[in-house]
Amino acid sequence: METAISAGNGQTFSGVIGKVISYFVFGVWILITLVPLVWMGYSSFKTNEELNLDIYALPKAMFDNEFDEYVVVKPQLNIIYPYDPKVDTRERIIIESTTIAPTRRLMLQFLVKEEMPPEIQNLKYGDTLTLDQLPRKLARKISWDTVWFNYTSAFIRGGLAGKFANSIIYSGVSTFFIILLGAMIGFALAKMQFKKISAVVMGIIGLGYLLSIQSVIIPLFLMLSSLKLTDTHLGIILVYTAFGMPLSVLLCTQFMQGLPDSLIESAYIDGATPFRAFRSIIMPMARPVVVTVGIISVLGIWNEFLLVLVLASSEFTKSLPVGVFSFSSLTGTQLGWQLAALVIATIPAMIVYFSFQKRLAQGVVGGALKG
């Protein structure tokens, strides 16, 4: 009796220890995952000077800007104007922040002289003023612009808008073809009577799955160069589609092998063609694996860096990850812009993942169970 009780207590104690270890490991994993994201988020609102002074401190300068000081500067060639001076010929007073990126001609405001009070109109080069001296409406606008300075600079100076659009094009178009072609090949391998050919094709596709972009990047570049497809959207989409096909075919084939053959046979008896059976029967039933392949492909292409870095030489074809990397050379030590660009690149991927994470798990588990 006592032995049985001792054994039961031992099992209970072991179970508690196991749960404690499991929760500890899970908590550490959460911290490792979330802490960098939280730091990246709030650090994207810090000035370059704050990041160099204390990388872990909370942002202050961009939010506490009510009494920021500005100095009047002369027009210079390194100033980027937010308007066309040839079209808008109104005289402006250019002021630069002495707190955020001082003397670098980055944090600038262009005040229309005729709209300013006399005491500001009479300012000379080198004179200073504080934000609270400006008209209230203008001061609020400048204050808001200061808060989002890193993000607007990343978009305007770094050209992230075009790179963002390119990432959407690459991810969307490539994923569409990966799903369509992968599902078609998977249907042929799983439901058509070509067992020997199917085995050979599956072997070739499995070999393709083992190849990485890094291992074939040089011959790939040479091949695309001979075809005049480097630095083109078409060339990059074709390569992304080719590298996404193996996983798509493997998952679709495994999933479709578990679908009843009787449904396909009934469709053929009713006079359906293979394409009609694929479109009307297989694709609706294969929705879980289609969603899984889509999410994996979109996230993989969205975050891919090396391929576009090598194949895209112009700003017109570069994607978002390359744009984030380019801040290291374009702006030197402007870490705030780079962190803002990282946030811009990360948020869409997080939205896609958290929106479809349940369907992703269902597709993977469903494919495994049916296989």
Image: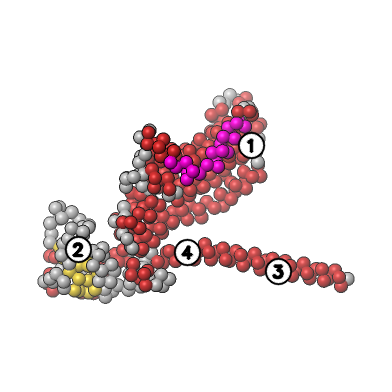
Residue 167 falls left or right of residue 275: left
Question: Percent x, y for residue 235?
Answer: 39, 38
Badge 3 is on which residue? 16
Q: Which residue bears the numbered disc 2?
A: 110
Q: Earlier in the sequence, mark 1 or mark 3?
A: 3
- Amino acid at pointer 4: Pro
Based on the picture, tell me whether residue 174 belongs to the magenta stretch. Answer: no
Using a 10 Å C-alpha cutoff, classify the residue at mark 4 as few (fewer than 14 neighbours), some (14 to 19) or many (20 or more). Answer: few
Q: Residue most toward the right? A: 1
Count neighbours of disc 3 (C-alpha within 10 A) and say few if under 14, some if 14 to 19, many if 20 or more.
Answer: few
Q: Earlier in the sequence, mark 2 or mark 1?
A: 2
Q: Position of residue 320 (x, y in %)?
A: 38, 51
Question: Nearer the N terminus, badge 4 or badge 1?
Answer: 4
Q: Position of residue 351 (x, y in %)?
A: 47, 55
Q: CA distance from mark 1 to mark 3?
A: 42 Å
Badge 2: few (under 14), some or many (20 or more) residues near its Cα, within 10 Å?
Answer: some
- Comparing 96 with 365, the one in front is 96
Q: On the image, numbered disc 1 is attached to which residue?
A: 257
Between the residue at mark 4 and the residue at mark 1, the CA separation in whole angstroms equals 42 Å
- Front disc: 4 or 2: 4
Lower position in the chain sequence, tag 4 or tag 3? 3
| Near-viewer residue (85 or 325) | 325
Marks 4 and 2, how far apart at CA: 36 Å
Q: Which residues are magenta?
A: 198-218
Q: Is residue 282 visible?
A: no
Would you say residue 210 sits in the magenta stretch? yes
Q: Disc 4 and disc 3: Cα gap in Å? A: 31 Å
Tell me the quadrant of the picture where the C terminus can be found. Answer: top right
Disc 4: which residue: 36
* Gap between marks 2 and 3 measured at Cα: 65 Å
